[in-house]
Image (cartoon, coloured by chain):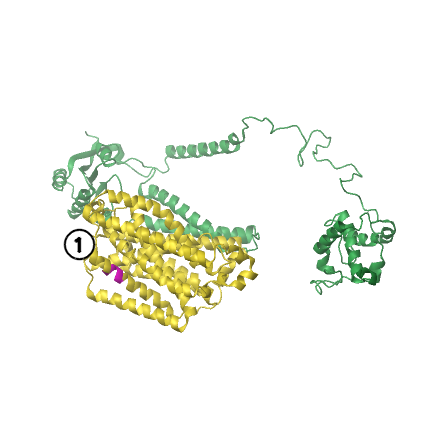
Amino acid sequence: MTDKHLFSITALFDTPDEVIHAAHETSQAGYARYDVNTPYPVHGMDKAMKLKPTRLGVFSLAFGILGAVSAVLFMSWVSLVDYPLIIGGKPFWSWPAFVPVAFEVTVLLVAVLTVVTMIVLFFKFPNNSHPLHDTPYMKRVSSDKFGVSIQADDPKFNERDVAAFLKKIGGKEIASVYFDAEELITPRRLFEPKFLAILAATALIVSGATYVIFNQIMFMEPFSWMSTQVKLKPQRPSELFKDGIGMQRPVAGTVARGFIPYAFAGKPDLAGKNLVNPLPMTKEVIERGKSKYLTYCSPCHGNFGAGDSRLRGQFPNPPTLHSDKVRTWPDGNLYHVMTEGQNVMPSYAAQISRDDRWAVVNYIRVMQRAHNAKESDLK
Amino acid sequence: MGGKKELPTRVTSLGRLLVFAGIALVALGYALDPHQMVFENVIGFLLFTSVAAGAVFLVALEYIGGAVWSVPMRRVNEFLALLTLVTPVLALPMFFYLHDIFHWLHPEALETDPILAGKSPYLNVDFLIIRFVVVFVLWNGFAFLFTRNSQKQDETRDPKLTTVNIRLAAVFIPVFAITLTLTAVDWAMSLEPHWFSTIIGVYYFSGTVLAALSVATYAIVRLHEAGYFPMLRRDHFYSLGALLFAFINFWAYIAFSQFLLIWYADLPEETFWFINRWHNGWEYVSVLLIIVHFAVPYFALLTQDSKMDLKRLKVMSIWILVAHLVDLYWLVMPTHSKNVSVSWTVIAFPILLVGMIIVVLSYKMKRTNLVPVGDPKLERGLSFHL
């Protein structure tokens, strides 16, 4: 027993009320170095033990403020300086969008850093041994009993007095707890090579395993029945061609399906002379032309082609379609203007298909006729 | 413990006085400016509903949650549940002025507005009255059953009645969720018939629980101080304070969620509601609401000690009830007036509410045990430790 030192004398209690009473009595009796161990938090204990409020809350508050401020600063930097993006037409600095993120970061930092602080500052990590560990006393107070342990380093400590005192306040199974002499020397072992080596090894193993899992194992194919095929893929290299490019340029002069090159680009006169309207003047064609006209032409030319649209004044006004010049134009000229554009009017070839442009020509003819109706039309 | 007790005559007559004063003020308001008063009536109706339906909910919550700490003071909520009988009566004047509050009622609006016409299968007077009747029949029915079983238990001491009430509570909770949402949609959301928020039911629910809880907390603390609840300890008060604190946070969470989703989506049919509350002086009410309904109670109830401090609890109960009133004002009033103009009529219904609470409590306390002496959980509730 020479290398064994007395750590404390312990006593067990049956109910939380009893242990609160015992803690109260112990602090009243003037003991300062003692602790209470319970299987779950017992409210009112800090008052019975006359404990000062823990300083851990101050750390939590600091971490919370740190989390909120750093989250807001980071998001502000991202959205104002590093990568300004307009999202949903909102200002760059849109604080409501920051609130959920700032809230989460705050909670995360408080939770993680408070636990780390508690372990490092209060539990003196990496020292993880305590004389009470692995004793019969600890086995009971971590399951169904409540315990008080008065330590030997208390200035008032006297082995016989303390045992008698604990018995007096209702304690049962009074026992002494010893610890080895080598445990007595407990300097901070944060920079001990063994600890640092284990820390480094843990970091390496965890990050290595994470890398392998997320970059290798997750992309292993259990089977590749049809997902891998020998075929050309757009934007991918290919060994089939000499230049190694998968997506080859079409042969010169290739024409896309359904696309006929316009033969009279820049030659309105020739277009007027040579182009023939392929569509008949039927009701369906006129309806089709009307629909396209109202969609694409009416914003400038007006609903009836008089050049009196709602955009009047905001752009140079288009001339009326009822002038003698336009009325006497052959169909080909009208088609040419739609295809190529004229003055400020751009080409509509991309918006209106070839056949639809001819249908619009027919509809314009209908409007011109209606605008200059003859007596005989009224019949 | 137990036994039927009477409130001092001074308090009872104050209650009666407040009820008469409240009714007189409401009548005067209707006589002077019915168009203004009917909106105050909507606010008052929602305020009464909050306390009444919230009290029934708190009773059901205790049963379904198997809570023991609240058993000794459950009767206060059972008594307040009687307000579900009073609330529909107070709603009656509104039905004479429905045309003033509901834009969807105007036939010329329905003719020209395809959106309103599309909503008319739900938003029409007949269905509104049906919903109103069904909702209050359900609430009164459940309140009656809960209190009847609980009071029967005082004599029979039959633990089976607790089981019956637990089953009732299991039915009531989903019924409550639907009925309270209907109430919020009918009387708060449909004031702006083009606007919609799928979270409005939860939003009103968070305020409802707060209102009922703050009334119950104030009543319990006051009764404890006056010697009616000598057996309550700080553990009980801490639990009340913690529940208040939790729902303060819940309200803020829901209120911000509603704002964030509408702000983010930025759809004109939703945003105009918030834009109306951010102009012509309403922006001050909006900011005030955040401070009064969240920031102040949050910090006032944050620490452990403040939840056990009886004086703090009393002050914060009144504060939160007033905050709920501001919340309802903010919810309803912008429909009535583009500018903030607080009229004296705003106090009529709160005065009536305070009077009604006193009258209902004194009426029930005379006839019913203040503590559910037959409840099998009472012993554990009395020796409740945190």
Would you place residue B99 above or below residue A120 in this image?
below
Measuring from the top left, give residue B3's x and y in whole percent: 17, 54
Q: Nearer the viewer, residue B261 or A75?
A: B261
Q: Is residue B191 left or right of residue B152?
A: right
Could you classify mark 1 by the number of other residues whose Cα lies within 10 Å: few (under 14), some (14-19), or many (20 or more)? few
Quarter placement of the C terminus of chain A: bottom right
Q: Hey, which quadrant is residue A13 in on the image?
A: top left
Chain for numbered disc 1:
B
Q: Furthest residue to the bottom?
A: B32
Residue identified by numbered label 1 = B3
- As drawn, the chain in green is A
Residue B183 visible, this orientation = no
Residue A309 visible, this orientation = yes
Tell me the magenta residue range.
B358-362
Q: Nearer the viewer, residue A259 or B121?
A: B121
Element carrying mark 1: loop
**Residue drawn 45% across the image and 31% down it:** A205
Q: Nearer the viewer, residue B259 or B39?
A: B39
Q: Amino acid at mark 1?
A: Gly
Would you place residue B65 above or below residue A322 in this image?
above
Q: Hey, which quadrant is residue A197 in on the image?
A: top left
Measuring from the top left, give residue A230's x and y in whole percent: 66, 28
Would you place residue B363 above or below residue A236 in this image?
below
Measuring from the top left, give residue A168's x and y in whole percent: 11, 41
Q: Colour of chain B?
A: yellow
Q: Nearer the viewer, residue B60 or A190?
A: B60
**Residue drawn 49% across the image and 50% down it:** A74
Measuring from the top left, give residue A54's x and y in whole percent: 29, 48
